[in-house]
């Protein structure tokens, strides 16, 4: 029994100490990418509105009464500070609009408005053209924002959880940064991306974060709202998980003895 414990302990120590550092970095040798390739795929990602998204829409005009019918339950357009507006920021009590499965929101005065597939900027322009000049004579300033732009990061990361993205643009590296990066036990070359489309269909994509050409693939490099990132444990973590309490105790003792031995050799050399 003692022999088995010692063998397991020594094997585990070798696994931890001899692991290849080549499996740890992201975007290995990315500096070798050609400039023309980077320029070809250079873009500012703009999220598109999807079913089940929650939006806020404010309409601002110089005459508060003109924009008021389109700002139900809010103080947007009036530039006034109301009770509950703890940050004293105009428009923070905005009415929210949920995009239905057909891609419509029920907008005041206008009625059903189809916004699915539009970017935030496109939706702003579309709504502005709907209400001007048909309902108000002044050209309004329309602001559309996502209330539910979030991604989830799970598995072998230091701080798994669900994260809200304020600027509505998030790369897979941004998501890992919000989760305080992968642990040393996370598989960098086989990360799972789970995504749902407007029809509720889920897709699963495997991503190699060590591949420098990942930055040239905007479909997976940039995350969509409600994406889920799952980082699987590597073989070292799996093997470590199979070691029992006795083996763990033996590893701790052997590790301590090795450290003491190394110190003594250094002192008396």
Image (cartoon, grey):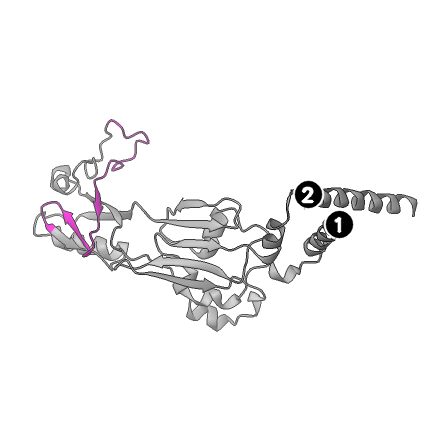
> Is 255 on the left or on the right of 94, as rendered?
right
Given residues 213 and 123, the one toward you in this image is 213
Q: Is residue 247 visible?
A: yes
* Magenta span: 83-111
Q: Main SS of the magenta segment?
A: loop
Return the residue at label 2: 246
Given residues 115 and 129, the one toward you in this image is 115
Q: List x then y, in percent, for residue 113.
A: 15, 53
**Which residue appears at 28% of the width and 30% of the height?**
85
Instruction: State how far apart marks 1 and 2 are (Cα).
Output: 10 Å
Q: Based on the displayed image, in which of its 4 quarters is residue 233 positioned?
A: bottom right
Mark 1 nearby-residue class (10 Å; few <14, some 14–19, many ≥20): some
**Which residue appears at 23% of the width and 29% of the height?**
82
Q: Is residue 43 visible?
A: no
Return the residue at label 1: 6
C-beta proximity under 8 Å, tags 1 and 2: no
Mark 2 lies on a secondary structure that is helix
**Which residue appears at 30% of the width and 31% of the height?**
88
Q: List x then y, in percent, for residue 43.
A: 39, 63
Spot the residue most to the front. Answer: 1
Q: Based on the displayed image, in which of its 4 quarters is residue 80 positioned?
A: top left
Given residues 103 and 61, the one toward you in this image is 103
Mark 1 lies on a secondary structure that is helix
Q: List x then y, in percent, for residue 266.
A: 87, 46
Spot the residue most to the left. Answer: 134
**Which residue appears at 28% of the width and 47% of the height?**
145
């Amino acid at each position: 029994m003692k022999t088995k414990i010692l063998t397991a302990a020594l094997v585990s120590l070798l696994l931890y100490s001899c692991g290849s550092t080549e499996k740890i970095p992201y975007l290995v040798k990315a500096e070798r990418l050609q400039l023309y390739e980077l320029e070809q795929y250079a873009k500012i990602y703009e999220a598109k509105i999807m079913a089940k998204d929650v939006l806020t829409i404010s309409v601002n005009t110089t005459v508060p009464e003109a924009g008021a019918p389109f700002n139900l339950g809010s103080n947007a357009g009036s530039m006034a500070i109301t009770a509950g507006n703890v940050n004293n920021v105009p428009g923070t009590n905005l009415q929210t609009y949920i995009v239905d499965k057909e891609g419509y929101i029920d907008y005041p005065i206008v009625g059903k408005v189809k916004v699915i597939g539009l970017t935030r900027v496109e939706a702003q322009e579309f709504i502005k053209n709907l209400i001007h000049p048909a309902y108000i004579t002044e050209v309004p300033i329309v602001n559309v924002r996502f209330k539910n732009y979030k991604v989830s990061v799970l598995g072998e990361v230091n701080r798994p959880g669900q994260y809200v993205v304020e600027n509505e643009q998030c790369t897979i590296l941004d998501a890992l940064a919000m989760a305080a990066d992968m642990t040393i036990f996370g598989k960098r070359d086989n990360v799972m991306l789970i995504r749902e489309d407007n029809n509720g269909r889920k897709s699963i994509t495997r991503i190699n974060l060590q591949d420098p050409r990942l930055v040239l693939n905007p479909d997976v490099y940039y995350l969509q709202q409600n994406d889920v990132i799952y980082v699987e444990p590597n073989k070292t973590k799996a093997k470590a998980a199979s070691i029992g309490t006795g083996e763990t105790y033996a590893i701790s003792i052997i590790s301590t003895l090795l450290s003491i031995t190394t110190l003594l050799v250094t002192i008396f050399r």
